[in-house]
Image (tube, rainbow, N blue to C red):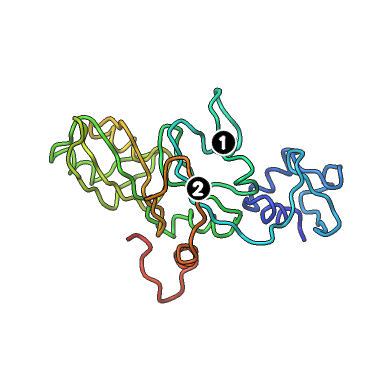
Amino acid sequence: MRLNHFLALAAGGSRREADRWIQEGRVRINGAPPESIGISVEPEKDRVTLDGSRVELPKERRYIAYHKPRGLLVSRRSQGGRRTIFEVLGASIRGLHAVGRLDVESEGLILLTDDGALSEALLHPRTALLRRYRVWVRPVPDPKMLRLLSRGTTVEGVPVKPERVTHEGADRGLGVLVIDLAEGKKREVRVMAKAVGLDVARLVRIQFGPVRLEPLAQGAIRPLTRTEIDALRRDAFPGPASGARLR
């Protein structure tokens, strides 16, 4: 088995990520660095480590939903003294990676898995998987702001447009919106809101594809149900008769 394939399966990443780990010198085979990026390993015989920790093929794929609190990084490495979700959750998610990102100030649903192929397919733009956010903004938006928000803006030079914007009313002087996206560009909701004069006070991802956040408590994790896993697979690997993923 090629080393990058083994790492993708064993460490819960993609083959591209595995190639990067090898190039960065983070991988050892039986204590020695790989001779080349395309080297093969025998999982039953060879001892493969990543950042000093042994990685092995999982017996069964894992799919976890996590309610991320505000203030945690969705990253393997801490930055600026901030803790990561991997530090907080520790052994309970060892070998898993996050499907996509939420910025440090955002909260809500993160999926974690060791299924690299599914993760890559879910994040691919062609999948157009639903990302639904509940967003508290100031000031309370007027009809003109809502129209402009629905038309979209540009993020990092790329036009972006929400699939749907719903105004749920006001909460303690803040406007409450539900925004549906079909892609997950960096800080997309915050950039779109700022472009129409809205400041995001709180942002919570409440749904990712068929998986919903509620009633998962903040900071808690749960395994996905078989129904949720099957629905994600249908979205990621649609057959000829599959419908749109955004719903």
**In the figure, is residue 25 to the left or right of 188?**
right
Secondary structure category for the residue under label 2 = strand
- Per the image, the residue denoted by label 2 is 221
137, above or below 232, in the image: above
Q: Which residue lies furthest to the left in this view?
A: 143
CA separation in Å, label 1 and label 2: 12 Å
**In the figure, is residue 225 to the left or right of 35?**
left
Instruction: Name the residue at 41% across, 53% down.
Output: 208
**Disc 1 packing (10 Å; few <14; some 14–19; many ≥20):** few
**Disc 2 packing (10 Å; few <14; some 14–19; many ≥20):** many
Amino acid at pointer 1:
Val
Q: Quadrant of the image for the C terminus?
A: bottom left
Q: Quadrant of the image for the N terminus?
A: bottom right
- Per the image, the residue denoted by label 1 is 88
Q: Residue 8 carries which label?
A: none
Snapshot quadrant of residue 147: top left
Residue 99: % across, % down: 51, 49
